[in-house]
Amino acid sequence: AVSHRSIAGVSFMLKFKRHLLLVSSFMIFNFFLFFIHPFFAYAKSISTPYGVLTDLGPKVRNISVNTSRAAMDKKGNCYLYMILHGTPTVLAVLDLNTGKVKKTFPLLDSTAAWAMDIDEGGVLWIGGTNKGSIYRFDPNTFSFKNFGNQLGGSKEVAIQDITHSNQKLFATTAYGANFFSFSKAKGKRVSGLSPLEPGKKFAKSIVYDQGSNTLFISLGAKANLLKWNLSTGKKEHILPLKYQSETYIYKMRIVNQYLFARMYPSEKIAVYDMKKNRFVAEFPASSIVSNKNPFKNEVYYTYKGKFYRFDLKTLKTYRTNLSLPPFTEAISLDFVKKKNGETVLTGLVDNDGRYYELNPIRNRLVIRKPTLPAQPVNLYTMTQSLDGSKIIINGYMSGGLCIYDVDTKKEIELKPVSQLETILVTPGKMYLGAYPKARLLEYDLASKWKGYPINPRKLLNLLSYGQTRITALIKKDNTLLLGTYPENSTGGGVLALYDTVSGKSTVYPNFINNQSIISLLAYKDGYIYGGTSRHANYKVSKEPARFFRFKLDNPKRVEFLPIPLNSVMISSLIEGPDGNIWGMANGTLFQYNPSTNSFKTKQILKAISGRFKNAVLVNGKNGLLYGTVEGKLFEVDPSTMKVTILLDHNAWDLAIDKNGTLYVRNLERLYSFQRK
């Protein structure tokens, strides 16, 4: 335990616990934030024309495993390959005979990776994120190679999945649902990047059937399944209508004549018979299936933490008496043979680094915890304590909170907690908008941090409304107001009101038609002001982003305000030092005077990227406004709207301490900026 002052200034004890993480592959939604280079080679302090920039270093470190595969080399050695989330992501090669990590390799240019496949020679291939690099690890020679960026010349941001033939890799991407092929012998891309279907954002999973020279590619959102015969060039959609309401097919695997397709978000696997050209079975499953059991005509999978068998002859499922730890699932499932002659099914247990070994002959299950190196991760949502003595910052994807003391320069990390889209600090409480499942968490600052779900605890879950992210969060009196971004509904985000006294909530679905609520402000005249994003459910509304307001006692009576901009996003609403409302509409700063119903605007950028998280505004201690947008840190004189660019790039998010010092993030590092 570590003693320290809490955000509210109350002493309490910290006890670090195992980090339990739910990582979803569609979290790469925000990779556009990281298409940037490090600040000035990470010098400790640099004097700029407008101030001093200081590198405060990485602030959140996690042991979080994106995915894994198990396989054997030509000599019969068996390994579990684990992708450790971090900046950069790391490949850890674990010897299953000893249970120890034999070596690690950094996946430079990638902050995460999910695409893995093992070819007929036992060679591991990995597709990365950010720049779409291809990596190869050969266990036969224990050699590693980075083939570099494969997405050059495109807007694609990540390799979603890969599969192999004898000579090639086939890969799919996001966010344009593109496809390309890569020559294993030449070590380079040998086809163009081509969209598989107009309007699709993801080509989520891909598998190759060598017997028929056919690719199966899952598309989303909404889900579809493309069957592509490479010999004839014929393409056809084969997903039945009842599955097309799914977001996408998360993972696929071919065993014998069957294609197993794991649906998302529902927990079910659909089985396609490639010989009969039709779907022949369906069963509930939380994982994908294993490769074939060497001893029986069956595959394994897990559902709600329990192991099941699927008979490849009868097409029936059978429950075993083996279970994983509570609230966990198998992330990967591969049969391998160890040096002692034992054949085991092995793979990850959730994402915390544990793995299991299941002996199908003895019907025995063992859970193992290897020693893995913690990795610095990209930083994400940040804010400051009420008194400005602490900077609070969250880790991207694998979560975790860092509390940085501006006086002592010391930090503490709080775990477990997942990625946060919003952080709201109030007297005695901290409210967190947690991803995924749009969960509202409450952290009691007067009590000991125990990690989710104890302290912080869950107050609300908006997943049943198709919501994924709480992108706006404010408190007015005893009411918390939440605005959300949806990924699994048919309309827009919800407005949710949560009474902190009674614990009762009221939810208004599709509050602004087909748009997300990404900013809220409780203004002094009794109105709640809000701003939207045109993006929702991987779609773009035909209407421009809306600037709106309503009275707290009657949210349904919404008034739209005539902002003189045709914008994609209206974000970061604050009450400025002049008493007016300030916000960002795309790359344009605006001031709204509620008394005169008039606007003033100042363009900072002509274009921006992203869907819901881009700009941040704060009030300075000197009567000026400060903000970030698209990596630029700027200063505003409210009386003249004069804008001064303080940092031209690599400045994301924004917080301010009690001394007026500004804080921004870039990749895994936190920076302070002291104005001259």
Image (cartoon, helix red, strand yellow):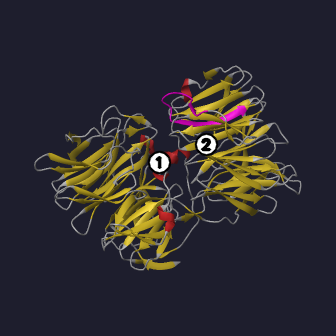
The span shown in magenta is 192-208
* Mark number, residue 188: none
Which residue occupies 42% across, 80% down?
408
Which residue occupies 86% across, 49% down?
74
Q: Position of residue 36 (x, y in %)?
A: 48, 54
* Mark number, residue 32: 1
Q: Is residue 377 left or right of residue 427?
A: right
Q: Is residue 60 left or right of residue 8?
A: right
* In-front residue for pair 371/50: 50
Q: Position of residue 356 (x, y in %)?
A: 72, 55
Which residue occupies 55% across, 26% down?
242
Residue flagged by tag 2: what amino acid is it? Answer: Gln
Mark whose residue sits in front, 2 or 1? 2
* Mark number, residue 150: 2
Residue pushed farthest left? 596
Looking at the rendered image, the quarter that the C terminus falls into is bottom left
Q: Is residue 554 visible?
A: no
Question: Would you identify the image quadrant in which residue 264 lies?
Answer: top right
Residue flagged by tag 1: what amino acid is it? Answer: Phe
Is the residue marked by circle 1 packed among few (<14), some (14-19), or many (20+) residues within 10 Å?
some
Question: Would you identify the image quadrant in which residue 287 lies?
Answer: top right
